[in-house]
Image: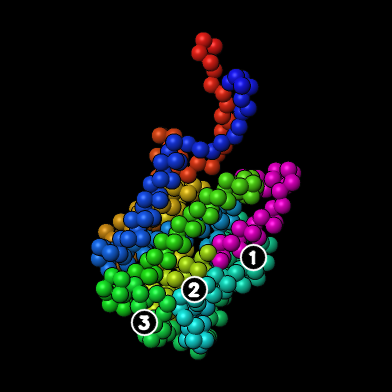
Amino acid sequence: MTPSDTPWRASSKTRAGTFVAILAVAVILIGLVLPGFASRRLIQDLFYILTMLTLAQIWNLLAGYGGLVSVGQQAFVGIGAYALFGAVILGGMDPMLAILLGGVAGLVLAVPMAFFAFRLHGAYFAIGTWVIAEVTRLLVAQWKALGGGTGTSLPRAATSDMIGVAQVAELFDVRTAAARDILAYWIALILAVAVIAGIYGLLRSRMGLALIAVRDNPEAAKSVGVDVRWLKWAVFLIASVATGLTGALIFLQTARISPDAAFAITDWTAYVIFIVVIGGIGTIEGPILGVLVFFLLRNSLADYGSWYLLTLGLIAILAMIFAPKGLWGLISARSGLHLFPIRRRLTGPLPERGEG
């Protein structure tokens, strides 16, 4: 078969993408063995980075790819966390298994939330999700069995005897509290990898192409047969499950909960939006870069009180004015680099020597 007979085909593979895949495997393996020689403080910091990265990737899927700008994601974080606490304290369930109920609780809340919110558009949709999140917080604050408005803590016996803690403590020769941190870190690492891989796989599928089409022009997407309503429902429900799981994990690690902490719009939505905006909305690479920038700023400015939030706000405004596509957008525009390529390019036969 001559080169001219070789068929053209669409491919999204790039050298950078292949390199990143190999690098990602290496990073994951290092992350798994890291607790063997890292300090407890570092493990806690990495847990925070991984959970915030997961929340940022989920919000980016909703807003950056689906066009669903939600400012009520704290509702799923909070309901997932309270589902875990309720299952452990009232039902006697092992906390490790109760994490799964966080995802179920997020899904249950998402159905009525989407039913009302999807009747709104644009800024009204964003405000609607926030209102529903606040209503959820007020309702949960009436749950006296879990401390009402003041909150409660997980029983020490439940966190000490949960699945895997004894084995981790023996493996690394650490105390129970440190073993719990390691176990939570491992789950956060697995969850972050699963969410990023899942989003990347989704965007490379026909459903992902349809999702981007809906974001860019819903009417045009409808005209080519895309079921816009079903697609938005699917993405919103998937995001709610992942956010609920993450919320359950976050508050399992802290072992303490209250309505104000679990449903904090600043911690679980505002910071997440900042991460995505700074890094680059509508890209997988953006939240990864954004969460590192956010963590450095958080550690550098956290001691300055209200100036910390003002500085973050100022940086976000400057980024939206001078770098609307975020830091990764600037890097990608100048270098042409795509670590998670999703665009398909036609590849075909190279001309034989002497031709052309």
Secondary structure beneath disc 2? helix
Q: Main secondary structure of the magenta part?
A: helix
Q: Which residue is mark 3?
A: 160
Q: Is residue 13 magenta?
A: no
- The amino acid type of the residue labelled 2 equals Ile
Residue 8 drawn at (x, y percent): 61, 28
Q: Which residue is mark 1?
A: 114
Query: Mark 1 or mark 3, which is nearer to you?
Result: 3
The residue located at (31%, 75%) in the rendering is 169
Res 234 → quadrant? bottom right
User: Can residue 130 be seen by looking at this rendering?
Assistant: no
Pointers 1 and 2 in contact (CB under 8 A)? Answer: no
Seen in the picture, residue 1 relative to 138 is either above or below; the reply is above
Residue 99's label in the rendered image is: 2
Residue 63 drawn at (x, y percent): 55, 54
Mark 1 is surrounded, within 10 Å at the Cα level, by few (under 14), some (14 to 19) or many (20 or more) other residues, namely some
User: Can residue 68 be seen by looking at this rendering?
Assistant: yes
- The amino acid type of the residue labelled 3 equals Ser
Mark 2 is surrounded, within 10 Å at the Cα level, by few (under 14), some (14 to 19) or many (20 or more) other residues, namely many
Secondary structure beneath disc 1? helix
The residue located at (28%, 77%) in the rendering is 175
Which is nearer the eye, 1 or 342?
Answer: 1
- The amino acid type of the residue labelled 1 equals Ala
The numbered mark, 1 or 2, whose residue comes first in the sequence reads: 2
Which is nearer the eye, 91 or 25?
Answer: 25
Q: Is residue 233 magenta?
A: yes
Which is nearer the eye, 286 or 261?
Answer: 286
Q: Which residues are magenta?
A: 214-241
Q: Measure the alpha-carbon separation of dots 3 and 2.
A: 16 Å
The numbered mark, 3 or 2, whose residue comes first in the sequence reads: 2
